[in-house]
Image (cartoon, rainbow, N blue to C red):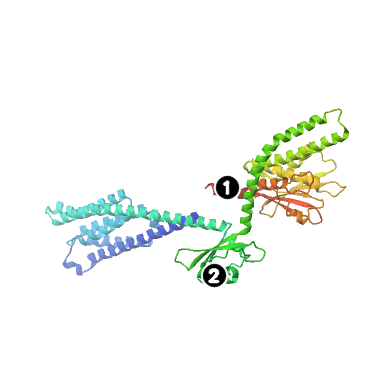
Amino acid sequence: MAERQARRAEDAAGDITRRELYFFNLYRLLEAVVYLGLVFSTLAVDWIRISHADLGRSVTLIYCAVAIILLISTDRMRRRLSASIGLALTLDTLAAALVLFSISGGHSSIPMMLMVNVGVGALLLPFRQSLLLAALAAVGVIAPPLFSYFSAATVDRSILEASLFGFAYIAVAALCAHLGRQMRETEALAEQRGVDLLNLEQVNDLIIRRMKTGVLLVDDANHILRINESAWHLIGNPSPNQRDLGQVAPELSRRLYHWRHSGRIDQNPVALAADVPEVIPRFSRMSPNDDTHILIFLDDTSLLSRRAEEMTLASLGRLSASIAHEIRNPLAAIRYSAQLLAESENMHEEDRRLVEIVNNHCTRANEVIENILQLSRRERSRPESIDLNAWALAFVEEYKQSNDLGQDHLRAITQNRTIEAMVDPQHLQQVVWNLVQNAIRYGREPGSVARVVLVARMATDKGPPLLEVVDRGPGIPAKVAAQIFDPFYTTSEDGTGLGLYLARQMCESSQATLEYVPVAGGGACFRITLSPAATLAARTAAQAT
């Protein structure tokens, strides 16, 4: 987008240069017509004397033809600006000098016209080249009277006039070159400012589109002028052709009308369409005294609740980590004491059973502490590109080597295509290991073996990559499935309730999502949606720039 905007600025500058060249070439043609009039017209005989008629007529005819060609070739001249203008000014000087040589009297009109050529050329050319061409023009107007002086040996005041014109050419060229440089610098600065403004507008538009808060811009007739993706979703995904706020979101239009007339905002949450979260609308004028354009902000209450919950969980996590540190040492002492008691030879069987219970609960409490500490000191994700098919096959082999599955089955299903995903391999290893353990433990019908499948596939032809842990067990009831990712929620007597919560947190840190998907016919599926390697790499590069 920025490149297109810069290209537009360059095209605009090119159009300006083309227009300047066109008028410059048009002036050259008019200049040639004046030369023709001086040489061919009988009306000019009274105030000029043609000393070399054939030369003057030949030069003016050739110069007129050249002027026509240059006018037609304006676009080609723009491609090689300096060389084209330099050559054209040289031809202008040569034509003026030869015409001056061919006539006598009325010399001042031709040098005056040539001064325009010198000035315009200096506006378009660099300083040194402008001075060089101005000096050439000065020589061109001084040479004819000097030649007449040396050939006739008489002093003519036209030499003084020509010298003054030569000095004026250099002065005009220097001044116009300076003005031209300032003009080009100002033009370049304006172009850069224009590109910067367009880039800033693009960035602002991108930020507004990606904001979680819904944003709408409406006019005094309640027509929606701008809307971002969040607002479009929060008002029920209306048709892009529907721009009347009263038809799209009547309740929002009513609240806007109430705010415009009373200045008070209704803070009660409202759902603006079916199956969308409740929002709290806020209104703001574009400027203090401008009622023609109103900004509407839609705050998603579910996001606010989620942020508050995350802040609460973060605070609880830090508190739990502190408590876990304090509990760890006494727990280790209790476990060590229980192990010493278990080594006693005179212990009764009932006492030995009690010691075993103490050991089991110490182990469970230690697992809770380890999970809490792992959650509190969770390392930053280090995503890298992996081949998901190869990773799934290697994981299954590693799991089989590390665990005695007995009669249980674990296998991987992959696609006949390369699936590249961007993820932290260590986090993915921990997450899938936990999911497979749960599937083997709980994903079986009573009295039957566990059949667990690790599936690596693409959601569609273009992604995103998916990694699924599927079992053929009894599945998870809908009421339980809504809470399985909550911290400390468990239906097992010896579970900690942190495994799935920790797994989801690890996935989110790697720009992935973990969700539960019911399986038709029985069973459970935990699906990890990963970021494609190209997508995450481009996102990271955009954030870096």
Residue 285 spot, x, y in % from top left: 49, 64
Q: Is residue 330 left or right of residue 189?
A: right
Spatial CA span between label 2 and label 1: 44 Å
Circle 2 sits in a helix, a strand or a loop, which is it?
helix
Q: Amino acid at mark 1?
A: Thr
Query: In this view of the protein, which residue sits in the foreground, 15 or 520?
Result: 520
What is the residue that sits farthest to the left in this orientation? 154
Residue 252 spot, x, y in % from top left: 58, 67
Nearest-to-viewer mark from 2 and 1: 2
Which class describes the residues within 10 Å of circle 1: few (<14), some (14-19), or many (20+)? few
Query: In this view of the protein, which residue sits in the foreground, 367 or 74?
Result: 367
Cβ–Cβ under 8 Å for marks 2 and 1: no
Circle 1 sits in a helix, a strand or a loop, which is it?
helix
Q: Which residue is mark 2?
A: 258
Q: Is residue 237 left or right of residue 486?
A: left
Query: In this view of the protein, which residue sits in the foreground, 364 or 116?
Result: 364
Of callouts 2 and 1, the N-terminal one: 2
Above or below for 451 versus 29: above
Q: Which residue is mark 1?
A: 540
Q: Is residue 268 left or right of residue 14?
A: right
Tell me if I can see residue 467 in this picture: yes
Tell me if I can see residue 373 in this picture: no
Q: Amino acid at mark 2?
A: His
